[in-house]
Amino acid sequence: MAMITGLIRVMERAARKAGGRLRRDFGEIEHLQVSRKGPADFVSKADMRAERILYDDLLEARPDWGFVLEEAGIIEGDPAKPRWIIDPLDGTSNFLHGIPHFAISIAVQEPRADGKGWGDVVAGVVYQPITDETFWAEKTRGAWLQDARLRVSSRTSMSDALIATGIPFQGAGDPAEWTRIYNALGPQVAGIRRFGAASLDLAWLAAGRFDGFWESGLQDWDTAAGCLLVREAGGFVTDYRGRSEPIHAREVLAANNVLHSRLHKSLAGALKG
Protein backbone atom coordinates (compact mmCIF):
# COMPACT_ATOMS: atom_id res chain seq x y z
CA MET A 1 0.00 0.00 0.00
CA ALA A 2 1.30 3.46 -0.90
CA MET A 3 2.10 6.01 1.77
CA ILE A 4 0.11 9.00 0.53
CA THR A 5 2.06 12.22 0.96
CA GLY A 6 0.65 15.51 2.15
CA LEU A 7 0.81 16.93 -1.37
CA ILE A 8 -1.34 14.17 -2.85
CA ARG A 9 -3.81 14.51 0.03
CA VAL A 10 -4.13 18.23 -0.70
CA MET A 11 -4.75 17.51 -4.40
CA GLU A 12 -7.22 14.70 -3.78
CA ARG A 13 -9.17 16.71 -1.20
CA ALA A 14 -9.55 19.60 -3.64
CA ALA A 15 -10.51 17.25 -6.49
CA ARG A 16 -13.13 15.48 -4.40
CA LYS A 17 -14.63 18.77 -3.24
CA ALA A 18 -14.88 20.05 -6.81
CA GLY A 19 -16.08 16.63 -7.96
CA GLY A 20 -18.98 16.75 -5.53
CA ARG A 21 -20.06 20.05 -7.07
CA LEU A 22 -19.77 18.56 -10.57
CA ARG A 23 -21.94 15.59 -9.59
CA ARG A 24 -24.66 17.95 -8.37
CA ASP A 25 -24.44 20.05 -11.54
CA PHE A 26 -24.49 16.89 -13.67
CA GLY A 27 -27.87 16.08 -12.17
CA GLU A 28 -29.20 19.50 -13.21
CA ILE A 29 -27.61 19.98 -16.64
CA GLU A 30 -30.69 21.61 -18.12
CA HIS A 31 -30.32 24.51 -15.66
CA LEU A 32 -26.66 25.29 -16.41
CA GLN A 33 -25.63 28.44 -18.23
CA VAL A 34 -23.36 27.56 -21.16
CA SER A 35 -21.26 29.85 -23.32
CA ARG A 36 -19.12 29.18 -26.39
CA LYS A 37 -15.35 29.83 -26.32
CA GLY A 38 -14.90 28.80 -29.94
CA PRO A 39 -16.27 26.35 -32.52
CA ALA A 40 -17.55 23.31 -30.58
CA ASP A 41 -15.67 24.62 -27.49
CA PHE A 42 -17.99 25.25 -24.58
CA VAL A 43 -17.66 26.42 -21.01
CA SER A 44 -20.42 26.06 -18.45
CA LYS A 45 -21.05 27.36 -14.98
CA ALA A 46 -20.02 23.88 -13.83
CA ASP A 47 -16.50 24.40 -15.25
CA MET A 48 -16.23 27.79 -13.58
CA ARG A 49 -17.52 26.64 -10.21
CA ALA A 50 -15.25 23.59 -10.15
CA GLU A 51 -12.23 25.68 -11.13
CA ARG A 52 -12.97 28.21 -8.38
CA ILE A 53 -13.21 25.45 -5.75
CA LEU A 54 -9.89 23.99 -6.90
CA TYR A 55 -8.22 27.39 -6.98
CA ASP A 56 -9.41 28.39 -3.51
CA ASP A 57 -8.45 25.07 -1.89
CA LEU A 58 -5.04 24.81 -3.51
CA LEU A 59 -4.22 28.50 -2.93
CA GLU A 60 -4.98 28.06 0.76
CA ALA A 61 -2.73 25.00 0.92
CA ARG A 62 0.17 26.50 -1.07
CA PRO A 63 -0.31 30.31 -1.11
CA ASP A 64 2.93 31.08 -2.99
CA TRP A 65 2.43 28.65 -5.89
CA GLY A 66 1.27 29.77 -9.32
CA PHE A 67 -1.53 28.36 -11.47
CA VAL A 68 -2.18 27.37 -15.07
CA LEU A 69 -5.97 27.20 -15.29
CA GLU A 70 -8.04 26.22 -18.32
CA GLU A 71 -10.60 28.97 -17.80
CA ALA A 72 -8.80 31.70 -15.83
CA GLY A 73 -5.42 31.36 -17.53
CA ILE A 74 -2.01 31.82 -15.90
CA ILE A 75 -1.77 33.23 -12.38
CA GLU A 76 1.83 33.86 -11.42
CA GLY A 77 3.25 32.75 -8.09
CA ASP A 78 6.74 32.67 -6.61
CA PRO A 79 8.93 31.74 -9.63
CA ALA A 80 11.11 29.58 -7.38
CA LYS A 81 8.14 27.46 -6.34
CA PRO A 82 6.09 24.87 -8.27
CA ARG A 83 2.84 25.66 -10.04
CA TRP A 84 -0.51 23.91 -10.41
CA ILE A 85 -1.78 22.89 -13.87
CA ILE A 86 -5.55 22.34 -13.71
CA ASP A 87 -8.39 21.20 -15.91
CA PRO A 88 -11.53 21.52 -13.78
CA LEU A 89 -13.71 19.55 -16.20
CA ASP A 90 -12.05 17.46 -18.89
CA GLY A 91 -14.84 16.17 -21.09
CA THR A 92 -17.12 19.21 -21.02
CA SER A 93 -19.01 18.09 -24.14
CA ASN A 94 -19.70 14.70 -22.54
CA PHE A 95 -20.86 16.46 -19.37
CA LEU A 96 -23.23 18.78 -21.23
CA HIS A 97 -24.74 15.87 -23.18
CA GLY A 98 -25.38 13.82 -20.05
CA ILE A 99 -22.59 11.33 -20.77
CA PRO A 100 -21.01 10.27 -17.44
CA HIS A 101 -17.41 10.30 -18.64
CA PHE A 102 -15.43 13.33 -17.46
CA ALA A 103 -12.68 14.12 -14.98
CA ILE A 104 -10.77 16.67 -12.96
CA SER A 105 -7.04 16.84 -13.69
CA ILE A 106 -4.47 18.45 -11.37
CA ALA A 107 -0.70 18.39 -11.86
CA VAL A 108 2.29 19.95 -10.09
CA GLN A 109 5.15 21.23 -12.24
CA GLU A 110 8.48 22.34 -10.82
CA PRO A 111 10.58 25.26 -12.09
CA ARG A 112 13.81 24.36 -13.84
CA ALA A 113 16.91 24.46 -11.66
CA ASP A 114 18.47 27.10 -13.93
CA GLY A 115 15.44 29.34 -13.51
CA LYS A 116 14.66 29.25 -17.22
CA GLY A 117 11.09 28.05 -17.56
CA TRP A 118 9.39 24.97 -16.24
CA GLY A 119 10.63 21.43 -15.79
CA ASP A 120 9.31 18.11 -14.58
CA VAL A 121 5.80 17.28 -13.49
CA VAL A 122 6.25 15.72 -10.05
CA ALA A 123 2.68 14.93 -8.98
CA GLY A 124 -0.63 14.33 -10.70
CA VAL A 125 -4.22 13.46 -9.84
CA VAL A 126 -7.02 12.53 -12.23
CA TYR A 127 -10.33 12.20 -10.43
CA GLN A 128 -13.43 10.71 -12.08
CA PRO A 129 -16.41 12.03 -10.07
CA ILE A 130 -19.08 9.61 -11.32
CA THR A 131 -17.08 6.45 -10.55
CA ASP A 132 -15.33 8.06 -7.55
CA GLU A 133 -11.92 6.88 -8.80
CA THR A 134 -8.73 8.75 -7.91
CA PHE A 135 -5.77 8.03 -10.17
CA TRP A 136 -2.60 9.56 -8.75
CA ALA A 137 1.14 9.53 -9.21
CA GLU A 138 4.28 11.11 -7.82
CA LYS A 139 7.61 11.14 -9.57
CA THR A 140 9.66 8.01 -8.65
CA ARG A 141 6.84 6.73 -6.39
CA GLY A 142 4.69 4.98 -8.97
CA ALA A 143 1.12 5.37 -10.18
CA TRP A 144 -1.89 4.33 -8.15
CA LEU A 145 -5.68 3.94 -8.22
CA GLN A 146 -6.64 4.70 -4.66
CA ASP A 147 -4.18 2.34 -2.88
CA ALA A 148 -3.71 -0.18 -5.71
CA ARG A 149 -0.48 0.04 -7.75
CA LEU A 150 -0.95 0.63 -11.47
CA ARG A 151 1.02 -0.90 -14.33
CA VAL A 152 0.58 -0.33 -18.03
CA SER A 153 -0.67 -3.27 -20.09
CA SER A 154 1.85 -6.01 -20.85
CA ARG A 155 0.37 -6.70 -24.29
CA THR A 156 2.95 -6.58 -27.06
CA SER A 157 0.96 -7.65 -30.11
CA MET A 158 -0.69 -4.91 -32.13
CA SER A 159 -3.49 -7.32 -33.01
CA ASP A 160 -4.40 -7.57 -29.30
CA ALA A 161 -4.11 -3.86 -28.53
CA LEU A 162 -6.99 -1.52 -27.72
CA ILE A 163 -5.94 2.03 -28.60
CA ALA A 164 -7.50 5.30 -27.44
CA THR A 165 -7.48 8.52 -29.42
CA GLY A 166 -9.16 11.87 -29.88
CA ILE A 167 -10.89 12.54 -33.19
CA PRO A 168 -10.65 16.02 -34.74
CA PHE A 169 -13.90 17.98 -34.54
CA GLN A 170 -15.19 21.39 -35.57
CA GLY A 171 -12.39 23.90 -35.22
CA ALA A 172 -9.90 21.54 -33.56
CA GLY A 173 -7.34 19.06 -34.77
CA ASP A 174 -6.00 18.05 -38.18
CA PRO A 175 -8.45 15.65 -39.88
CA ALA A 176 -6.06 14.77 -42.71
CA GLU A 177 -3.25 13.89 -40.30
CA TRP A 178 -5.58 11.90 -38.06
CA THR A 179 -6.97 9.98 -41.03
CA ARG A 180 -3.48 8.98 -42.20
CA ILE A 181 -2.63 7.70 -38.73
CA TYR A 182 -5.94 5.87 -38.39
CA ASN A 183 -5.55 4.23 -41.79
CA ALA A 184 -2.11 2.98 -40.73
CA LEU A 185 -3.06 1.76 -37.25
CA GLY A 186 -6.69 0.70 -37.65
CA PRO A 187 -6.06 -2.50 -39.66
CA GLN A 188 -3.36 -3.60 -37.21
CA VAL A 189 -5.07 -3.27 -33.81
CA ALA A 190 -7.95 -4.91 -31.94
CA GLY A 191 -9.91 -1.67 -31.62
CA ILE A 192 -9.79 2.12 -31.45
CA ARG A 193 -11.83 4.12 -28.93
CA ARG A 194 -12.69 7.82 -28.67
CA PHE A 195 -14.26 8.61 -25.29
CA GLY A 196 -13.72 12.37 -25.18
CA ALA A 197 -11.53 13.02 -22.12
CA ALA A 198 -7.77 12.81 -22.69
CA SER A 199 -6.87 12.84 -18.99
CA LEU A 200 -8.99 9.73 -18.46
CA ASP A 201 -7.60 8.07 -21.58
CA LEU A 202 -4.11 8.43 -20.13
CA ALA A 203 -5.21 7.36 -16.64
CA TRP A 204 -6.88 4.27 -18.12
CA LEU A 205 -3.72 3.56 -20.11
CA ALA A 206 -1.75 3.69 -16.86
CA ALA A 207 -4.27 1.24 -15.38
CA GLY A 208 -3.93 -1.19 -18.30
CA ARG A 209 -7.47 -0.61 -19.56
CA PHE A 210 -6.10 0.82 -22.80
CA ASP A 211 -2.90 -0.38 -24.46
CA GLY A 212 -1.97 2.81 -26.30
CA PHE A 213 -3.02 6.39 -26.99
CA TRP A 214 -2.42 9.04 -29.60
CA GLU A 215 -3.82 12.53 -30.06
CA SER A 216 -2.71 15.99 -31.14
CA GLY A 217 -3.97 19.51 -30.56
CA LEU A 218 -4.42 19.19 -26.80
CA GLN A 219 -3.40 21.60 -24.03
CA ASP A 220 -1.05 21.20 -21.07
CA TRP A 221 -3.95 20.87 -18.62
CA ASP A 222 -5.33 17.94 -20.63
CA THR A 223 -2.20 15.83 -20.35
CA ALA A 224 0.12 17.03 -17.55
CA ALA A 225 -1.20 14.63 -14.90
CA GLY A 226 -1.88 11.84 -17.38
CA CYS A 227 1.65 11.84 -18.81
CA LEU A 228 3.07 11.37 -15.32
CA LEU A 229 0.58 8.58 -14.56
CA VAL A 230 1.63 6.64 -17.66
CA ARG A 231 5.35 7.08 -17.01
CA GLU A 232 5.07 6.10 -13.36
CA ALA A 233 3.05 3.03 -14.41
CA GLY A 234 5.98 1.92 -16.58
CA GLY A 235 4.89 3.37 -19.92
CA PHE A 236 6.46 5.66 -22.48
CA VAL A 237 5.14 9.07 -23.55
CA THR A 238 6.58 11.02 -26.49
CA ASP A 239 5.56 13.24 -29.35
CA TYR A 240 5.12 11.85 -32.86
CA ARG A 241 8.87 12.17 -33.49
CA GLY A 242 9.74 10.16 -30.41
CA ARG A 243 10.91 13.12 -28.34
CA SER A 244 10.21 13.07 -24.61
CA GLU A 245 9.24 16.23 -22.72
CA PRO A 246 7.73 16.75 -19.23
CA ILE A 247 4.31 17.48 -20.77
CA HIS A 248 3.04 16.46 -24.18
CA ALA A 249 -0.02 18.25 -25.48
CA ARG A 250 0.32 19.21 -29.12
CA GLU A 251 1.31 15.61 -29.95
CA VAL A 252 0.99 12.62 -27.63
CA LEU A 253 1.91 8.99 -28.25
CA ALA A 254 1.82 6.67 -25.24
CA ALA A 255 2.02 2.91 -24.59
CA ASN A 256 4.24 0.31 -22.99
CA ASN A 257 7.78 0.15 -24.36
CA VAL A 258 7.15 -2.57 -26.97
CA LEU A 259 3.85 -1.22 -28.28
CA HIS A 260 5.15 2.34 -28.22
CA SER A 261 7.94 1.34 -30.59
CA ARG A 262 5.52 -0.43 -32.93
CA LEU A 263 2.93 2.34 -32.81
CA HIS A 264 5.61 4.95 -33.43
CA LYS A 265 6.96 3.07 -36.44
CA SER A 266 3.49 2.86 -38.00
CA LEU A 267 2.60 6.44 -37.14
CA ALA A 268 5.89 7.85 -38.46
CA GLY A 269 5.46 5.90 -41.67
CA ALA A 270 1.93 7.22 -42.10
CA LEU A 271 3.02 10.84 -41.66
CA LYS A 272 5.83 10.48 -44.20
CA GLY A 273 3.37 9.40 -46.88
Image: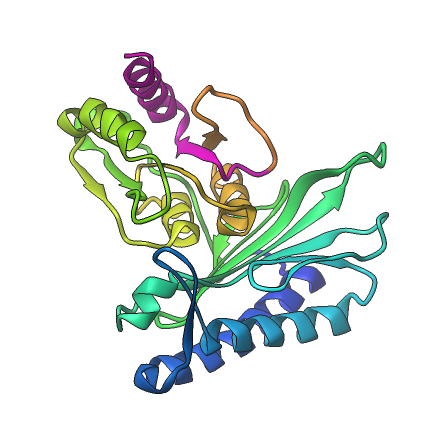
**Res 205 seen here:** yes
Q: In this view, does 215 lie to the left or right of 3?
A: left
What colour scheme was applied to this rendering of the protein?
Answer: rainbow
At x 37% / y 19%, what residue is drawn?
A: 261
In the rendered structure, does residue 264 fall within the stretch colored magenta? yes
> Is any atom of residue 101 visible in this view?
no
Q: Quadrant of the C terminus?
A: top left
Towards the viewer: 112 or 124: 112
On screen, residue 55 above or below 65: below
Q: Tally the numbered discs.
A: 0
The quarter of the rendered structure image containing the N terminus is: bottom right
Residue 263 in magenta? yes
Q: For the point 33% across and 18% down, which residue is it?
A: 271
Image side of residue 45 versus residue 204, left or right: right
Q: In this view, does 224 lie to the left or right of 255?
A: right
Q: Residue at x 39, y 54 (%)?
A: 200
Is 27 above or below relative to 128? below
| The residue stretch that appears in magenta | 247-273
Q: Which residue is drawn at 41% across and 46% down?
A: 202
Q: Compared to 7, does 257 lie above or below?
A: above
Residue 34 at x, y = what percent?
40, 75
Q: Seen in the image, is 189 located left or right of residue 238?
A: left
Q: Residue 55 appears in which quarter of the rendering?
A: bottom right
* Spot occupied by residue 216 in the image (x, y as percentages of width and height): 41, 37
> Toward which corner of the image does residue 27 lie, by quadrant?
bottom left
In the rendered image, residue 251, in percent from the top left (x then y), is placed at: 45, 33
